[in-house]
Amino acid sequence: MSTHYQPPNLALATIGLSLAIFMQALDSTIANVSLPAIAGNLGVSANESTWVITSFAVSMAISLPLTGFLSRRFGETRLFIWTTLLFVASSLLCGLSRSMGTLILFRAIQGAVAGPMYPITQSLMIGIYPNHKRGMALALLSMVAVVAPIAGPILGGWITDNYSWPWIFFINVPVGIFASMVAASQMKGRVETTTRPKVDYVGLIALIVGVGALQIVLDKGNDADWFDSGFIVITSIIAALGLIIFLIWELTDKDPIVDLKLFRHHNFKFGTLALVLSYAAFFAINLLLPQWLQRNLGYTATWAGFAAAPLGIIPVMLTFIVGKYAMRFDLRLLTSAAFVVMGATCFIRASFFIGIDFYHVAAVQLLMGLGVALFFMPVTVILLSDLEQNEIASGSGLATFLRTLGGSFAASITTLLWDRRAVLHHAQLSEHITPYSTSVRTALGEYGHGNAQAGAAVVNGMITQQSYQIAFNELFHSLGWIFLGLIVVIWLAKPPFMAKAGASAGGH
């Protein structure tokens, strides 16, 4: 691989690389709010339309850990340009799709080429910035990775309401073409050494089968009622067998397609563990809050997006400050502060109630933005700090893959727990409502305007609402303790945090 390379225009190169990542991260969430419109337009059920999300997530999860292999084979610059152009082409085809089958196929291709984009961009950004500005580059990328998924549902809802759903894909075309042209012009002098590594077909097939099946289980498990579904049971068995074969093969093969031996590095091991667990908890928050706003408070998808959006304000404001000054501190202290802030916001949400107003919800999101601003960049620097320069793309790809998988686990577990706890609380709250009670009969008559059956339906709705509220509060209380517990994990990493990768990237 190459050492530090100075592009002709550093600012333009940074904009081009960042735009590609913004586009890629935006597409992970932009289609979510458009599913009803897509389902109606293509004549399929709401349940079938969710494959638009699943196909993207499955393909991306499979291709992410292949980043290191692909970068060694084709070179980082060429891989970035081609994945960006292929992302543009697949986006165009998604927008032009006139059947659900073709849309799912092109979304799967879009996810496959999206996988390597973030880790490759991270490696390129480290390579074009000198050592003392490396934190700035990573802080900028972290900010983009946080803001884009927040903007996705808002932008997706606005485009779908004012234009039509294909435009959520068409907007990628000019952005991606610009980003790839900038990269081609700014990186053409970057010298890279490529190799022709032997293709580890056993590892590749095991990865595709194991990770693909696991991602389908995590995405579809809740809708299919988990292990009461034969489809989920069979897919889980396939996932387990595929992953066991993958792990054994990759750890024993002398030229593996995914280098699991990267975990021999101390900081990579504990930094990745902290990243995966904290991102899973962060993902759970971002999943629970909009669902709660819509289910319990009656918000539209767009207004739920606006309530969540203040999360991105402080990361945008602090990006350059964190990037410039973070390396002067022990990065474990900054990460600990981030976990304290994020944990505190979870404890605040644990006291939310059905009558809470928009501004309180938005204010807590704004506060959590401070934790997010101090979180991604320090953790990323820590986990990359003891990798060699030629291991950065592989390490970043592997860490991002595990982070993505952590988010998928968090989504499934959070949704399952919220539903199960709500059912339990519903049973407890309705225990004392009996037709044999005079006060209950009177209350049912009042709520139903003289009709006890209508009154019972109203009361049942109120109990359901309160059950989900209690379960929501319980989950956030647990998430608060998880963030505080992660402080212990990050302190298992050891300084210095500007070791091999930093030195090589800086060319000093």
Image (tube, grey):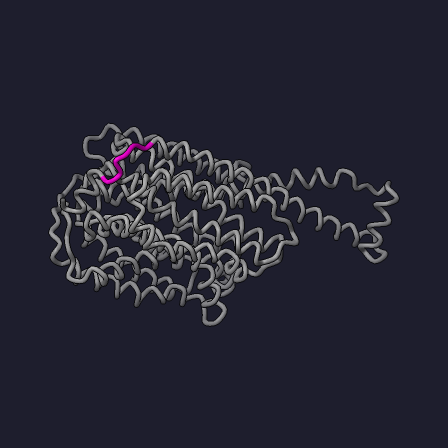
Q: Give residue 19's position: percent from left, percent from top.
A: 30, 60
Which residue corresponds to the image point at 86% horizontal and 49% vertical from the top-left?
A: 442
**The magenta stretch spans residue 93:** no
Which residue corresponds to the image point at 26% horizontal and 57% vertical from the top-left?
A: 17
Q: Is residue 187 visible?
A: yes
Query: Is 278 placed above or below 19 here?
Result: above
Q: In the orientation shown, which residue stands out farthest toward the bottom?
A: 162
Q: Is residue 109 visible?
A: no
Q: Which residues are magenta?
A: 493-498
Total number of numbered discs in the rendering? 0
Q: Is residue 5 left or right of residue 210?
A: left
Query: Is 26 placed above or below 213 here?
Result: below
Considering depth in this image, is 359 or 242 the residue closer to the camera? Answer: 359
Which residue corresponds to the image point at 32% horizontal and 31% vertical from the top-left?
A: 245
Q: Main secondary structure of the magenta part?
A: loop
Question: For residue 106, which quarter of the picture?
Answer: bottom left
Q: Give residue 483's position: percent from left, percent from top.
A: 46, 38
Name the quadrant of the C terminus.
top left
Q: Give residue 338's position: percent from left, percent from top.
A: 42, 43
Question: For residue 357, which quarter of the picture?
Answer: bottom right
Q: Give residue 315's position: percent from left, percent from top.
A: 39, 54
Q: Is residue 207 left or right of residue 129?
A: right
**The magenta stretch spans residue 495:** yes
Considering depth in this image, is 256 or 408 the residue closer to the camera? Answer: 408
Name the quadrant of the N terminus.
top left
